[in-house]
Image (tube, rainbow, N blue to C red):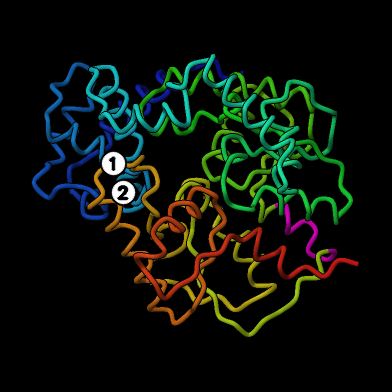
């Protein structure tokens, strides 16, 4: 078992990367949020233990969306994204986190007190249990439950079990069609902790990770499947940290295991694909989603795509500077339009929610979830 906490790992990795940095500025040129006047020396000094933290560096820490575009361009392999996370942690320790972080976590995370989290979960269970909507009734029994059946597959929905998108229900519908043995884990108390980490709240992330590892153990699955890139990152982390035996899978990785049974129907329609930063770049897995899509449609790649060069959706600005976040999303829609495709496919629920919230302002390209896309193309007897 790896006993190091997030904070200890961040400090160690930041120190190593600071030593590797030679100040050539390529990371800042690739960054979608960096102020051109912010220097590498200033950032490094602010990140270093005991270093003076400048106001400009704190602004960078709040604006950083953790897309990781900075990492592959560094000639020495210094990870600016790791250093930025350490800077975010220092921002929190200094009490300098922006108000909109507190608002985000009050709605969706740790700032919702234990009593409020329990009350919210109970209210949603009751409301959904008697809902006219089949989707709600299906998911109600899984919200923050404590008893889990042993299963081969565990579908981990975390916080996104409450999403307005249909990804959760369609995932379970596919599983039912395939006739596989599965269990479901989701709710506020089963959050993966990655949002807290992205905001520099490492102590909270630690608590969530520990709790998640304990919940996964209850089902003792062979595979844990999620449609959220950040949840996938957390699953990989707890598997390593707590020496767990399960295999974490993205939904495309899972669906590719059954491509011979899905009977996916082909179409001549061209689609483009948006890579999740955490899956394609940080986990190095741009291929599974493309393999899956390629069985249904021809893919026209955007100018910036794949593990090294994909562009962010902007979600992990956590509701910050609208000029920056809207600009990131608009840039992605424009690239999608340039391909000539009418549809942009995403594999991550956070990317889906982010783009759906911007679709009206950026007409011309329809955003679709890869699970929904597969669900609409299945031909299972």
Q: Is residue 380 above or below residue 11?
A: below
Whether residue 341 appears in magenta in the rendering, the answer is no
Q: Depth check: 18 or 133 in front?
A: 133
> Residue 334 sits in which quadrant?
bottom left
Dot 2 falls on a residue whose secondary structure is: loop
Q: Which mark is residue 70?
A: 2
Q: Is residue 344 above or below residue 107?
A: below
Q: Which residues are magenta?
A: 254-261
Quadrant of the snapshot with the N terminus: top right
The image quadrant of residue 326 is: bottom left
Instruction: Identify the residue at horizontal 66%, vertical 56% (top origin).
Output: 252
Relative to 36, 118 lies left or right: right
The residue pinned by badge 1 equals 320
Q: Disc 1 to disc 2, how far (Cα)?
A: 20 Å
Residue 212 relative to residue 132: left or right: left
Q: Main secondary structure of the magenta part?
A: helix
Q: Which quarter shows the C terminus?
A: bottom right
| Residue 212, percent from left and from top | 63, 25
On the image, the x and y values in percent for residue 286 come to 54, 58
Q: Secondary structure at mark 1?
A: loop
């Amino acid at each position: 078992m790896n006993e190091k906490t997030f904070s200890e790992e961040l400090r160690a990795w930041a120190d190593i990367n600071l030593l590797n940095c030679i100040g050539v500025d390529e990371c800042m040129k690739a960054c979608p949020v960096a102020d051109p006047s912010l220097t590498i020396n200033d950032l490094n000094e602010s990140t270093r233990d005991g270093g003076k933290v400048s106001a400009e560096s704190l602004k960078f820490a709040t604006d950083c969306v953790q897309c990781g575009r900075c990492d592959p361009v560094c000639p020495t392999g210094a990870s600016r994204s790791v250093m930025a996370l350490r800077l975010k942690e220092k921002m929190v320790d200094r009490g300098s986190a922006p108000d909109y972080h507190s608002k985000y976590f009050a709605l969706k995370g740790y700032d919702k007190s234990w009593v409020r989290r329990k009350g919210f979960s109970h209210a949603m269970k009751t409301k959904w249990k008697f809902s006219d909507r089949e989707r709600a009734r299906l998911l109600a029994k899984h919200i923050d439950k404590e008893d889990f059946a042993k299963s081969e597959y565990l579908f981990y929905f975390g916080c996104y079990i409450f999403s307005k998108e249909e990804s959760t229900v369609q995932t379970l519908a596919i599983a039912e069609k395939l006739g596989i043995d599965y269990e479901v884990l989701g709710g506020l108390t089963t959050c993966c902790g990655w949002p807290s980490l992205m905001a520099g709240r490492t102590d909270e992330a630690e608590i969530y990770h520990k709790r998640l590892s304990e919940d996964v153990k209850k089902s003792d699955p062979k595979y844990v499947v999620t449609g959220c890139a950040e949840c996938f990152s957390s699953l990989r982390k707890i598997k390593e940290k707590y020496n767990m035996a399960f295999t974490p899978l993205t939904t495309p990785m899972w669906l590719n295991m059954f491509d011979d049974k899905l009977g996916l129907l082909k179409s001549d329609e061209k689609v483009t694909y948006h890579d999740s930063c955490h899956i394609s770049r940080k986990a190095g897995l741009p291929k599974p989603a493309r393999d899956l899509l390629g069985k249904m449609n021809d893919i026209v790649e955007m100018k910036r795509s794949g593990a090294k060069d994909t562009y962010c959706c902007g979600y992990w600005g956590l509701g910050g500077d609208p000029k920056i976040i809207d600009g990131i999303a608009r840039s992605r829609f424009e690239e999608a339009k340039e391909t000539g495709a009418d549809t942009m496919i995403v594999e991550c629920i956070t990317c889906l929610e982010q783009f759906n919230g911007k679709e009206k302002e950026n007409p011309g390209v329809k955003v679709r979830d890869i699970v929904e896309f597969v669900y609409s193309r299945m031909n299972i007897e």
